[in-house]
């Protein structure tokens, strides 16, 4: 089983904290620590294709096998909420994925996007219409969807969408035909769950959760999305060695 470890973005990385010098871009420094990253900035603003092409070129100089996954634009999931207006943003995001050679596209629906009949139908119309062109879809539902998990499972099965979870909160319900698990670890606490550092015990529990899936999946993506994501991801990688 392949466990692929990375973080949700590279912009907060301080290379000197990891004794990295002589780097041309923070992304290059990141690529010396990890072999994959989730591009989180695409959620807030879809970059120009030239920018995405430059990111791909930068990591290719460091490691040609480097993998990008992409979080789709909030225009799709949060603003238009899978309505007709979403399709233009999807096409733009798809071109960014091509430039990055990204195979996985993450849709994170907001907690306020409830598991109502109307919203389920919105998602059905959206996923029936869009052309994947080789992309594998990943969905991170939040909020009331977990009151009736069958709604998640039915949509994931119908459209072959990988169910993304924080494994400390929920269990993956569907791994897709690709047999992939996608974990996003956010942390705990108030007022912000992201201002969190995972303990050695918790990272050990995470490793056990991964091992429990050994006969169910071919690969697990483990993405840290907390304040100390780079440090925690490195500690977890060391546990895999």
Image (spheres, rainbow, N blue to C red):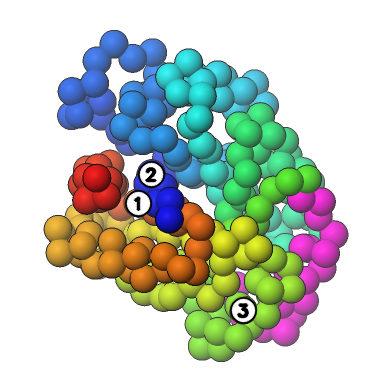
Crowd class of label 3 (few under 14; some 14 to 19; many from 20; radius 10 Å): some
Asked which secondary structure carries label 3, the reply is: helix
> On the picture, is 148 further left or further right than 63?
right
Q: Secondary structure at mark 1?
A: strand
Residue 109: tell me if it is visible.
no
The answer to whether 232 is drawn above or below residue 186 in the figure is: above
Q: Give the residue pinned by disc 2.
A: 6
- The disc at residue 153 is 3
Asked if marks 3 and 1 touch (Cβ < 8 Å), the reply is no
Judged from this view, the residue extending furthest toward the left is 200
Q: x, y percentage for residue 56?
A: 56, 25
At x 34% / y 65%, what residue is drawn?
211
The secondary structure type at the circle numbered 2 is strand
Quick one: label 1, few (<14), some, or many (20+) residues within 10 Å?
Answer: many
Pointer 2 and pointer 1: residues touching (CB < 8 Å)? Answer: yes
* Percent of width and height locating residue 170: 41, 75
The magenta stretch is 113-132
- Res. 84 in view: yes
Residue 128 painted magenta: yes
Residue nearest the viewer, comparing 21 with 190? 21
Rendered image: mark on residue 70: none
**50 vs 212: above or below:** above
Of the 4 image quadrants, the one containing the C terminus is top left
């Amino acid at each position: 089983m392949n466990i692929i470890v990375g973080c949700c973005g590279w912009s907060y990385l301080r290379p000197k904290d990891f004794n990295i010098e002589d780097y041309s871009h923070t992304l290059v420094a990141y690529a010396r620590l990890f072999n994959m990253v989730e591009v989180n900035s695409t959620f807030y603003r879809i970059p120009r294709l030239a920018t995405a092409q430059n990111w791909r070129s930068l990591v290719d100089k460091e490691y040609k096998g480097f993998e990008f996954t992409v979080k789709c634009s909030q225009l799709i999931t949060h603003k238009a909420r899978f309505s007709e207006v979403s399709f233009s943003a999807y096409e733009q995001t798809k071109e960014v994925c091509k430039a990055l050679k990204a195979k996985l596209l993450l849709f994170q629906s907001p907690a306020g996007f409830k598991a109502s009949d109307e919203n389920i139908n919105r998602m059905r119309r959206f996923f029936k219409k869009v052309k994947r062109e080789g992309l594998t879809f990943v969905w991170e539902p939040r909020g009331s969807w977990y009151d009736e998990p069958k709604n998640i499972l039915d949509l994931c099965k119908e459209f072959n969408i990988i169910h993304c979870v924080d494994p400390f909160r929920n269990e993956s319900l569907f791994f897709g035909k690709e047999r992939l698990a996608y974990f996003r670890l956010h942390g705990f606490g108030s007022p912000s769950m992201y201002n969190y550092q995972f303990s050695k015990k918790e990272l050990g529990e995470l490793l056990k959760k991964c091992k429990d899936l050994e006969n169910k999946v071919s690969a697990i993506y483990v993405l840290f999305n907390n304040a100390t994501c780079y440090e925690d991801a490195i500690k977890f990688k060391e546990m895999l060695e």
